[in-house]
Image: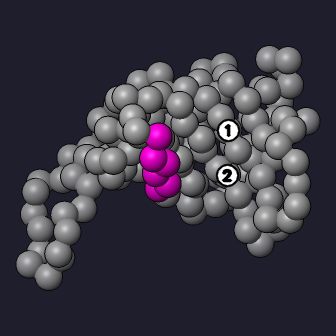
Amino acid sequence: MQRQIETVLGKAIRLAERLEHIIVTTVGEGGMPHVTAAGKVSLQTEGQVAVTAWFCPVTVMNLQKNRAISIVIWDADADEGYQLLGEMKRIEDLAFMDGYMPEEIERPSPQIERKLVVRVDKILGFKHAPHNDIEAA
């Protein structure tokens, strides 16, 4: 089973390398889902990936209470993709903004670029066309 996950995970990472956006979903303490975009997914160690982005505070707060995470890697043009389901193992701070904020921006943007290291437990196929939720092969 682990070998199958590794094979499919490799395919998912290769697809992610061609895309500009990855979708990350977390769930807060009260059960409210939160969806955000990330920029990059890369293979870490066996069965783990790293997701990097300027994550909004809600994503980080959710993961501090509930480590379950879904990462969607989807090429909309080809309608092919994967949903990686797993658990966030750790959060690493990568870069900090200097706090500069132009006057015309109403809401502050994320100030810390972070890397989420995620253990992948299950991989599902993902597409717009009708599909099932059975693990990808």
The amino acid at mark 2 is: Ile
Q: Please, what secondary structure does the residue beneath circle 2 have? A: strand
The residue lying at 17 percent from left, 75 percent from top is: 106
Q: Please, what secondary structure does the residue beneath circle 1 have? A: strand
State the image coordinates of residue 34 (x, y, percent, origin top left): 46, 51
Q: Earlier in the sequence, mark 1 or mark 2?
A: 2
Q: Which residue is mark 2?
A: 73
The amino acid at mark 1 is: Leu
Asked if the stretch drawn in magenta spans residue 32, the answer is yes
Count of numbered circles in the view: 2
The residue lying at 10 percent from left, 63 percent from top is: 100
Magenta-highlighted stretch: main secondary structure? strand
Whether residue 68 is situated above or below residue 16 in the rendered picture: above
Left or right of 9? Residue 4 is right
Quarter of the figure with the C terminus: top right
Left or right of 38? Residue 108 is left
The residue lying at 78 percent from left, 52 percent from top is: 126
Which picture quadrant has residue 116? Answer: top left
Asked if the stretch drawn in magenta spans residue 90, the answer is no
Q: Nearer the viewer, residue 125 or 33?
A: 33
Q: Which residue is mark 1?
A: 84
Quarter of the figure with the N terminus: top right
Left or right of 18? Residue 26 is left
Residue stretch in magenta: 31-36
Label 1 and label 2: CA atoms lie apart by 8 Å
